[in-house]
Amino acid sequence: MTDFSHAVRAEWLKLKGSPMVRFSFIAFGLAPFMVGLFIIFIQYPELAVKASSFSAKAQVMNIQPNWPSFLAVLQQALAVGGILVFGFVASWIFGREFSDGTLKDLLALPIRRSTLVKAKFAIYFIWCLGLSFSNLVIGTGIGILLHLKDFSAGPQSLTNYMITTFMVILSGSPVAFIASWGKGYLAPLAFVALTLVLSQILAAAGFGQFFPWAVPGLFSDISGGTNLLTGWSHVILCLTGITGYFLTRIYWTKADHIS
C-alpha cells in the first residue's frame, strides 16, 4: 500500500468510530422528508388547512406534485443546506486534530504532510458525496411513495443535482484552511455562517454571481437567478475550491505545528 492509501485508511477508521458521521447523515437527511411533506400538502389540500404555514411556504416555492419540481426543491435544499453541512464536515476533518490534541502524533508518522492533506480532502469528498447520494436515495423513495408523475425531465434534474453537489463540495475547501489556521472548530463554523449570510445579501443585491458561496444557490434557481450566472461565476467558484486546497496544503506543510 502507498502512503496515501495508509493515510486514507487511517482517516476512514476515524470516521467509523465517530458519531459525527451518523449525526451529519441524520441532519442532512431531514431535507427530503421536508420536501415530501410540502408535496403531501399540495396533493391533499384538506390537510393544508391544519398547517397553513407549510401550505404557504409550498406555494411561495411553487412546488408541484411531480418529479421535476420535487428534484428541483431537493437540489435547492442541497445548495443551501450543503454549504452548512459540508462546511461542518470540512471543519471537523481538519479541525479535530487541533482540538483533540492529536496533531503532533499525526505529524510524527512517516508520511508527508502533503499526503495527509490529500487524504483528508479525499475523505471530505467521499463523505460529502455520500451525504448527497443519501438524500437522493431517500428523496427517490419518498417520490415513489407519493406517486409523483412526469419523470421525463428526471435525467436532466439528476444531472443538475450532481452539478450542484460538486459546486457545494468545491465551496467547502476554504473551510479546511480556516479550520487549520484557526486550530479548531469555532473559526470555520463562524466562517460558514458568514458565507451563508453574505450569500443571501449579495444574491438579493444582484451580486451573487460573483460570490462563490452564492453560485450553487443561483444555479439551483432558488431565487430565479440561474440566468444571472456567467462563465466567470463558475471560474470564480473553481478558483475558490482550488485556492482553499492549496492554502490548506501550504499551511500544513510550512507552518510550525510543534511549538
Image (cartoon, helix red, strand yellow):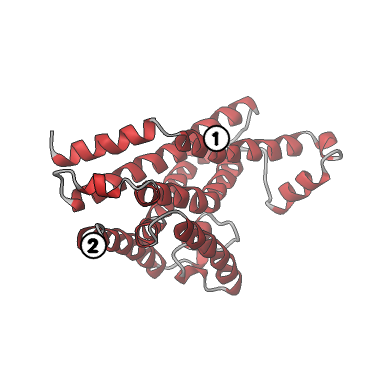
Q: Residue 31's quadrant in the figure? A: top right
Which residue corresponds to mark 2? 256
Q: Look at the picture and state if 91 lies above or below 214.
A: above
Question: In the rendered view of the protein, which quadrant contains the C terminus?
Answer: bottom left
The three-letter amino acid code for the residue at tag 2 is Asp
Callout 1 secondary element: helix
Task: Evaluate whether residue 3 shows in this view.
Answer: yes
Give the image location of residue 182, x and y in percent. Answer: 39, 61
Which residue corresponds to mark 1? 26
In the rendered view, does 75 fall on the left or right side of 233? right
Give the image location of residue 106, x and y in percent. Answer: 25, 45
Task: Evaluate whether residue 135 shows in this view.
Answer: no
Counting the numbered discs, the total is: 2
Give the residue at x 18% y 41%: 4
Label 2: few (<14), some or many (≥20) within 10 Å? few
In the rendered view, does 238 fall on the left or right side of 149? left
Give the residue at x 50% y 49%: 82
Q: Residue 13's quadrant in the figure? A: top left
Q: Nearer the viewer, mark 1 or mark 2?
A: 2
Q: Residue furthest front?
A: 259
The three-letter amino acid code for the residue at tag 1 is Ile
**Residue 65 numbered tag:** none
Say whether marks 1 and 2 touch (CB < 8 Å). no
In the rendered view, does 179 fall on the left or right side of 85? left
Q: Nearer the viewer, residue 14 or 123?
A: 14
Label 1: few (<14), some or many (≥20) within 10 Å? some
Q: Residue 37's quadrant in the figure? A: top right
Give the residue at x 47% y 34%: 19
Q: Look at the picture and state if 77 lies above or below 147.
A: below
Q: Nearer the viewer, residue 189 or 204?
A: 189
Q: Earlier in the sequence, mark 1 or mark 2?
A: 1
Question: In the rendered view of the protein, which quadrant contains the N terminus?
Answer: top left
